[in-house]
Each structure stands twice: as structure tokens, then as C-alpha cells.
Image (cartoon, coloured by chain):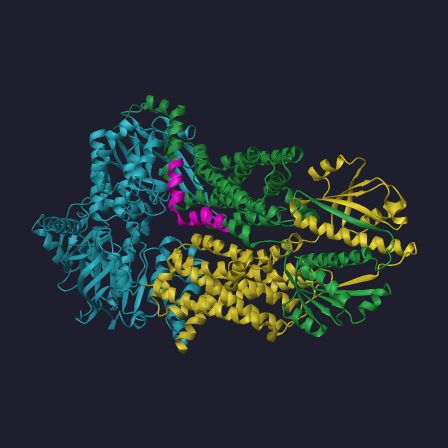
Amino acid sequence: MIAPGEPKLSWHASGRARLQRLAALVRKETYQLFRDPSAIAIGIVMPVLLILMFGFALSLDVKNVPVAVVLENPSPTTAELASGFVLSPYFDTRELTSMPSAEQLLLQQKVDGIVRIRSDFARQLNSGNGQAQILVYGTDANRARIIEAYAQGAIAQFQARRAAEGYAAPSGGAAVVQSRMWFNEADDSHYFLVPGLIVLIMTLIGAFLTTLVMAREWERGTLEALFVTPVRAGEIVISKMIPYFVLGMMGLALCIFAAKFLFEVPFRGSVLLLTGVSTLYLLVALAIGLLISSLTKSQFVASMATLIITFLPALFLSGFLFDLRSMPAAIRVLSYALPARYYVNLLQTLFLAGNIWSVVLPDAAVLAGMAAALLALARAVTTKRLA
Amino acid sequence: MFEALLRIVALIRKELLAILSDPRSRVSLFLPPVLQCLIFGYAATYDLNNVPYAVLDQDRSAASHDLLAALDGSGVFRRAAQLYNVADIKSVIDEQKALLVIQIGQDFQRRLEAGLPADVEVIADGRNSNTAGTALGYVDAIVDGFNADWAANHGAAAPPLQVTMRAWYNANLETRWFMIPALIGTLTFLQTLLLTAMSVAREREQGTFDQLLVTPFRPFEIMIGKALPSVLIGLIQATLILLVAQLWFRIPFTGSYLTLYAGLLLFLLAAVGMGLMLSAVVSTMQQAMLYAFVIMMPFALLSGLTTPLSNMPEIFQNATLINPLRYAIDIAHRVYLEGAGLPQLVPDLWPMAIIAAVTLSSAAWLFRGGLE
Amino acid sequence: MSMQPHGGVAVLGRHVRKTFRRETGETVVALDDLSLEVPHGGLAALVGPDGAGKTTLIRLIAGLMPLDAGTLVVNGTDIARDPQRVQDRIAYMPQRFGLYEDLTVRENLDLYASLHGISDEERRRRYPELFQMTDLAPFTGRLAGHLSGGMKQKLGLACTLIGAPELLLLDEPTVGVDPLSRRELWEIIARLVREQNLSVLLSTSYLDEAERCDQVFVLREGKLLASGPPGEVTALAAGRSFEAEPQAGEPARNLQSRLLDEPAIIDAVPEAGRVHLVSAQNGKSAAPEQSAAALAGLSIIPVPARFEDGFMVLLRQQSGAAGKSLAAPPLSPEPAARSDETIITVHDLVRKFGTFTAVDRVSFEVHRGEIFGLLGPNGAGKTTTFRMLCGLLSATAGTLRVAGFDLRRARASARQHIGYVAQKFSLYGQLTVADNLEFFASAYGLRGRRKRERVAWALTQFELEPLMRLPSGQLPGGYKQRLAMATALLHSPDILFLDEPTSGADPLARREFWRRITQFAEQRVTVVVTTHFMEEAEYCDRVAILDGGRMLAVGTPAEVRGLAAAAGPDRATMEDAFIAIVERAREHRMDASP
């Protein structure tokens, strides 16, 4: 059974042997990936769940807000004001005649706002001193602010209409804001939620799933025998990345497909560029996952650490939901160290704005640098040595 | 019965000892909620305070200057660039040098003086349309203020209709006031779910579960002994977050602590029940952790924490009815910000009681089944 | 230094030193100035008590750890300079091989074949050979995780052999493997050495295995005590080995227990109803019956020395009494009256998992105060039976009465009367020794003065007092087992269940363990134990042998040996008897099935 030593050695050294070893390891990782129910849960079930939730359930667009319009003394004028609310797509109006019953509704969370038109409204309006009171349920501040803005809009329209009909003298010159929202003319929150979703899924597959693989081998003691073979440490690292890289790219394809056909989010950049920057981010995520995995050598500790280091920041500190510029300086500085920040920016730009090189190049360069550094580090900490 | 009680007490003591005797596990239980509360308190906000904007002022008049001064003085906007050419707008927005570009036409002051409407064009970067929308709202408010000042200074008639705005419970409309009370529920949910699922999984993995099962413990006694320490730890974590909210973020607490804790207790029982259900079906800590995470994600996302429940389609809104976190967040808001009492919370309390009853009894059932 | 790969030295170590740093900061010396020469070709064994440094040495040779000092040359290559070159040409089977349990047998083998660069053509030639050798051919499509312990070891061996290594390193290859599989593994290894001139270096805690090797290295606390052919070690005990016949009615284990307390006796083990002992002095100068009071009036015959005897002599020589630091209060010399009260009744016990019948109509009885052994190959249904007896698993059919309670109905009440020690240490590692005892005492309903008394008893009896504030997870191995036993005995149970308590323990620890068990049996505690060490069956009053879920034999060790005597030689060991019984039953089954 013993083969002569020297020829065998040169065979190992050749590139073909290297490729054969790599292929065998990749095959092994792939089998393990698809036979592990928790990997399926994280790598396949979870992304689909996230796509459905982000696409259908989560939305920051305020529509059909239940409001009470209190007309203490209904008249044609107040009816006209109320109709502005009734006809608005943003409001679901209930007309009442007394304030206490409206407040009761607000307390019971049956309505989110009250528009109060007092009994002497018509008279005072004619004397140029009309008063309308808007009361919103302020607990959810973001939503309350949007409701306020819409309510103000409805009232402004009423004023303009009256002015045009000549009821009131022109109120003198006033600056009028003509706003335009570039890249998202429809003001649809899916436009930024769905690209953000890609970051979460890539982080999940890239970092969270791979963080288990090296630690699993340490825990199950499968590395010891593996080390005493011609396999090189670098081959072990690369073989662990390839299947998860492919899975991550499949996740990306699924997201792009869902974004385009399910949620109809526009895509204005180049798919090639998107694939390129996603590759970079995925490499960063994989390297972080493997790095944590190799350092902790425990699946449990590794997954906890990865959750805290990659997933939660991707959700909260990447600018995907919350504006980074408004955070305190310390957190802003911290966010520069997080790869998710650059990837979110790249995704939102490529999806909605297009190939804006002045954004794409610097962000991609940072990701490339991070990928290179982290991969080198992941390779360096993987040695064929028992600690 | 008395014997059973003594055994349960011994088990609770052992659980607490195991959790609290190790300094590392103490730190890992109580530091993350506080840190997360601090970081999310600062990071998870939809409020803006540092919006870079660019100006293309073609009028360069006293009026345009006043308007810009109002923007600069708002504390929200920061002038990042001065443009001289319409063609520059695109690159400023594209390259994210500014979130908004304010363009003032060259006849701005003339039109105002002539009593005509004078347009202020605002172009927003809609890549995050929520941020852009909020910024535009701020601009609207500032322009309104500018108009009022202009009218007052130039003796023009005020607009015939004045609108007064008031927000209940959160007068300054700060997202933080919304987020942090919600974190009391969210952070303790994750921790108790994980802690409970893990404490049983750890025993299984380390073989101590068998050792426990050969003692006279009955399955339901083990369940109670596992549930109560988690509830207790959850209450301590909730208290820590509550302290951060009041002492650090200075968010005024308007309700009754008793009411809040009553709601939290019910909520934690529901969460622990879910953790026990999970623990009955997993065999390792790693599985417990992964599945807890898989369960946690939809529960957290569909709780009203990041996006309002009322924005969801009906089918998802109905799905959230089984989500204890949804009720816990509502209770936290209503007690903390609104000062609601128990009677007003009944619509939140009974669904949680049902969830707790269902999860705890299914856990007991799974537990017994799992032992065969 | 020989640089030739063949006919020379396989492993050459000079002044090897390796230390580890504990979590507490102290430095532990694993190997201290160790020099050794493993010749090329043939079998070499590393033996020694736990903590001797066997595993560390093997890992160093495999290039898995850096040396602190010294040199280690493997097949002519300095391991420190080019570990990869060594790893390309040797094979290593760690204690726990770490097969990929979610891959099939074939996939595991394919992986290692590819890593070693074996071509398809070569595989076609070599796979049948390996499968035939390991009997794995029918299971190629099965997941490795679903194999029995013995089959896993064989698959691990196949994976290490696929690369046609020049040197094979095996770290405790037969731990947790039943006698049958152990014998098969040894046959494979012996064949490889014979037919292919392979060099094998293995570590083992079975001293009979060391005896079969060409070369042994005895290690202790990181130092080499002796090296050479096993005969040289055996010769140390020449003229010192005897066998003593206990008085009629006294179990051999009681005599053995008393003998161990005698300063003039180095070692004693029960064997075939007698006690095999090693005298501290050479037989010529002083007959043991004169120096040991316990032997007075007994018939004593000199017997040929064994490797184990020499090993014990060697350990004793090197470190005075440390060779038998056994601490247990002496036993009363008069044997306790044996009662016929039945404490466990198992009748037609059946347990099915789906369609698979793990335990098939098993019946036996255990009497109060007996030590009852459950023996069987891996997958025989031992563990399943054991778990049902402890109430951890419910029976599919049959009667199961423990301590007077029907386990199918009054499980919780029965538990008050049993103590259970799991195979793996299973107490709360993060709690201190005292906290663990405290908790389990409460769990068993002890309180007040009785609880304090029992906890104090446990601490003294098992000599745990100095360590009572230490987290139990940080206890040294032997103390962990003591604590586990202390916990199981807190509530003074009638029956003590022990699941493979000696698996992986060294010969010294095993003697200490049985010493205690003997003592508890004297106090009329019934002991039910499973084990893979057949010689340990000699400590039992009665043993049952299971295979394929069925009961093959039950009786006293002498009766069971007698069953095999027809097939084997007159003085068969328990291991021979076991193998004969199991094989005969398997042949029958094969004949019976169409």
C-alpha cells in the first residue's frame, strides 16, 4: 500500500492536487450545508421570510390615517374644509360634533389625530382670523410628524382654494415650497427598505452562517485528523468560503428578482456593478464570520459575537433605516468602521440613483480594502495548529 | 405538595446561582441591554439634527438671505455648499454632498413685495425617502415661520386661517421617546427567550438534564424552576433599561410603576413560555440560539418598533395578534408616556394572558412528550 | 541520527519539552526532557497513567503543536522545520477521530482520498480492500453519525489509511470500543504491520494491548520511565505474581480490596474467582503469605508475570506508594450475608424506536446488595436497557420493577430510591462542589439536619472537602467522578446505576473506582454497572451479556465463563467468554434468518 515517497510529494505540490483537495473540501462543505437544518433555517427560510416582511409588511408610508374632524357648528364652509380631509388619500375621516367624544377616540387609539373647527369658525374666517386646531397622537413621533404635515397640506389647499374663489383677499406675498423628491418621486418607503433588505440577507448568509463552520469543526474535533493530511490551511479557508459565497449570491439574485418583480422598486444602476460591490461585501462578511469562528472556536460564542458585531449594526448603524448624520459623533465615527454602512450606501445609490461613480468608487474602494485586510487576517489566524 | 415546593425553590436557587455566580455571565446578561439601550437610543431615531443642504440663491436679496438665515438657525440644517449654477444641483445631490438643495429664484424678493407667491424650490435626495420626507417637513415649517415674520414686518394681512398644532404625550415629537420605552419590551424579549431556551439546552448538552430527571423532580416542577428565574432576570433587565431611560435620556415617566410591572410580568411569562417551547424541541445550545434568532426576527420586525403596525396590510396586522411583543411595546408606551392605568390596558393584557397560557401549557406538554 | 526513511528510526525525539498554560495562569509541564527512538516498522505503544503526556507527544509528532524545547525528527524530517512535509506522509487518528457525522461513510472516505491526492484508478483498487478489511461495505451510504462506536473507529482508521502512510499515529484507538470491535481493530492493525511493513505508534490504557506491541514506552508525568520490548517490563515482576483463592463464600473483590491495603502488596485484581496479586518483594526472598496478613491461611500459587504486573511494579519503584494512592476505609473482613431479596425485576422488556427494536424481550433480576454488570458490544441495547431502568426512557412493553415500584406507573417515587452516574461528567460545571451537593440534596428532598449530615458525609467520604469551593467543572478528572458518585449517593439510595464509569480511565483510576464500589456493595447498596472492560466483570456478582437487543447469558462470572468453556480453552478469560458467546449467538441468528 505504501507508495514511494518522493514522487508522491511532487504530486502534492502540483496545482492539480491542490485543485483536487479544494474541490473535495468544497463538496464536503456543500453537503454539510444542505444537511444541516439550522443552516437551511438561516440561509434559506430566513431570507425568504425577510423578503416577505420587508416587501409586504414593513412600510413607513402613512396612508389612511384615522382622524376625527370635529365640526362644532357645521356649515358649508366647515364642510368644505372637512372635505379636504375626506377626499385626501392620507386620511380616513370621521366627522364628529363634540371635542370630548373625539378625545375619547384618541385615547382609545381609534383615531390618530383630531382636527378641531370651533363653532365660530366661519365667522372668524370671514374676519380674517380663522382658527383650526390639529391634535395628533404623538407617541410614535415619526408617524405623528408625517400626519401633521399632511394635515397642514390639506388646510393649505383649502386656503388656496378660497383665495382663488375670491373669498379672501390675497394674504400678501408668501414663499411657497415647491419640493421634489429625486430618485423616489412616488415617496414609497419600499424604495429604500428593499435595498436595505439585501444588506441584512447578505450579512446573514455571509457572516452569521459562516461563523458557525470553523467553530463547528473545532467543537466536533474534526480538524485534528484533517490537519495531518497534505491539506494546506489556506485551502481550508477558501473551501469554507466558496459554498457560502454561492449561497449569498443566490440570495442576492432572489432579492433583486423580488425587488424588481414583486415590489417594483426601480433599478437604475448597472447589474454588473451591483454584483461587483455585492461580491466585495460578501467577501468582507465571509471573512468576518470565519475570523470570529476561528478565534472563538465555539459555535455559540461565535454566533453571539457575529450577531452583535455584524447583524445588529447592519440593521441600526448602517443608515439603512436611520439617518447616520443625525447620530452623535461617537456613533457616527463607529459607523465608519462598519462595512454595512458602505454597502447600504452603494445599494441605495445603485438602485435609485444609478451609476454615480463618485459615490460608487470610494465606497467600493473601502469595501475592497476591508475585504483584503480581513481575508488576510482570516487566513493568518487559521493555522494547522491546535491551540 | 410541600416537598414539590421545596424542590422548586432549590432549583430556582441553583439556576440563579449558575447564572449569577459567574462574573462573565453576569456581565453578559446585564451589560448588553444597557449598552444596546444607549446605542439604539442614540442611533435609532428618525429625528434629524444635521442635514447638509446646498443653496442656489439666484436672488441674493435681503429676503432670500433672511430665509436662509432661518434655515441655518434652525439647528437642523447645515449649509454644505453654495451653488451658482442650476447644472451643479445634480452633482451635489448625486454625490451626497447635500441632502437638500434649496433653490431661490431671482425674483424672490420682488414677488414677495408685490404680494405674489414666490417659489422656493427644494430638491431632496430620496434614496432614503423617510429621511428626505422628514427634512422637507422641517423646511415647510421654517418657511411658514419665515412667511409669518415677513407678513408681520411688512404690514401685510396674516393669512385668514391659522393652524395650531399640538401633539399629545410627546410634545416635541422625539423619536427617542418612542423608541426607548419600546426597548424595555424588545430587549428583554430577546434575552429571556434566549436565556430560557438556552438553560434547558445547556442541561441537555452537558448531560445534566438526565441527572435532573433521575431525581424526584416532576416535569412541571422543572418547568416552573426554569421559568421563574428567567422572568426574574427579565424584570431586572427591564428595570435597568427603565433607569437608563429616566436617568440618562431623561424621558419623563408619567404612569404607575406597578401597572408597568404588572404588564411586564405577563409579557415575560409569555416570552418564557415561548423559550420553554423552543427548548423542548432543540437539543443543543447552538440550535437554541439559532432558532431563537429565527423566531425573534419576525416578532421584532412586526411589533410596531421600526415601522407602525397600522401601515401593514390587514393580513400582517392580524398575524401580529399572536405577537406578545406588540402588546408589551404598546403597554410600555401607554404607561410610560401616557400614564395609562390598568383598566385602559385591558385590550393589551388579555391577549398576552392567553399567549402566556398557551405557550406555557404547550411547553409543559412538549416537555412531557420529549421525555418519552 | 539516521536520515534513512526505511530500516531506521521512524520517530527520534531529543530532550523534548512541552508546557501548557492553565487558565489560572500556572504552567503545567506536559513533557519534560523526553528522549525516545521509535524504530521503523512494527508496533510501538505509549502507556502510562492519565496526565502522562501520551496525547501531547503524539500531537507533537503529528506537527499539531510547536515544541518548547528539544528536537523531534519524524521519518527524517525535523517537525519544527517542515511540519507539512511530515503531514504529507504520515497519518494520524486522534482519540476522537472526528468523522464528519453528516457525511456518509463513502463521502468521508472520498474526502480523505482526495486530500491525499488518490487518483480514481487507485481508489477503485484500494476501496474494496479497505471496505473488506473494515467490514464497512454494506454501510457505504450510511451517515457516519449513524454508525456504532466500533464502526466509527474502523471508518476513522480507513480514512487515515487511504493515504498509504509511512507512519501511523493512533491515540487511544480502542477507547469506548467493545471487545469484539477492539479485536477486529487490532487484527487490521496487525495485518498492516505484517504485510506492508507499516510503522505504528499508538497510545493505550489497555495494558494487554501494549503487551502485543514490539516496543513499549512507559510515560508518567511527562517523563519516560522505561522503553523496550514489553517483555522487559514484564520481567520486572518476575517471581512476584501469585494467585490467591479467597475463602469459600467471600467474593474475590473483598479479598482484593483488603490486599490493596497491605504495604507488601503492589497490586491485586480479582480474576476468575481468584485474586491475582503482585508482591512487593521477589517471591524467593519472602513469600507473600508471610508479609501480608490478609493472605494468612489461603492457598497461594505462583503464576507467570504479566505486562500489567511489571507496569505496576515500575510505577511503584519510581514513586514509592504513589502507585496505589487508593483511599478508602477498610472493609470488614467477614462477608455480608447475601440476601435473596429481589430489588430489580425486568421481565420481557421491549423498547422500540420506530420500527427498530433496540431491546427485545429482556428479562433478569437483581438482588439487594449485588453488583450486577451489563455487558455487550456497541449497539447491543445496554444503554437503552440502562436508561429504562433509571426511568429516563419508557418501555414499549414488559414489566419493570425497581425498588418495589412499577416504573411504568410510579416513576417519580422509584427515583427516590436510585442514584445515577452518567458516563459523561454531568453535574453543573459552573457551580462549586458544595453547591452541587447542596442542590441535589434538596432535589432529593433532604433538609435541615439530615441534609447537613449527608453533605458532610459526602465531602468526607470522597475526600472532597479541600476542593468544596472549587467550581466542579475545574476539578481534576478523578475528582469529577468522585463528586458524581457522592451526588448519586446523597439520599442513601438502594440502587446505584453507573454507566460505563471507567471508560477512558487509566488502570490506577479504575482500581480506585472499583475499590469504592466494592465498599458500597458491602453496605448493601445494589450496584448496576455497564462496562467495556471485560476484566471488570470479575468484580461483579452476576453479569448479563446483551447483543442485538437480546439477552444472551446471565449468571455469575464463573457461570458465564463456563458457558464459553465448551468452545474455548479451559481457563478462558472473561473477554474470551464474551467474544465466544456473542459470536455464537450471531451465527445462530444468521442461520435462523432465511
Closer-to-camera residue (A83/C511): A83
Q: Is residue A134 left or right of residue A111?
A: right
Residue occupying image coordinates x 79% and y 56%: A160
Residue occupying image coordinates x 60% and y 74%: B342
Task: Residue B186: name its quadrant.
Answer: bottom right
Q: Quadrant of the N terminus of chain C?
A: top left
Percent from the top left, x then y, of residue B1?
Answer: 39, 78
Chain B as rendered: colour: yellow
| Dominant secondary structure (helix, strand or loop) of the stretch shown in magenta | helix
Chain C as rendered: colour: cyan
Q: Is residue A159 left or right of residue C242?
A: right
Which chain, by letter, is green? A
Residue occupying image coordinates x 20% and y 39%: C187
| Above or below A159: residue B231 | below
Closer-to-camera residue (A372/C429): A372
Magenta-drawn stretch contains C489: no
Task: Write down the region rendered in magenta.
Answer: A26-49
Percent from the top left, x then y, of residue B25?
Answer: 52, 57
| Above or below C216: residue C493 | below
State whether residue C23 appears in this view.
Answer: no
**Residue reaching furthest left?**
C566
Q: Is residue A85 left or right of residue C331?
A: right
State whether residue C459 appears in this view.
Answer: yes
Closer-to-camera residue (C588/B136): B136
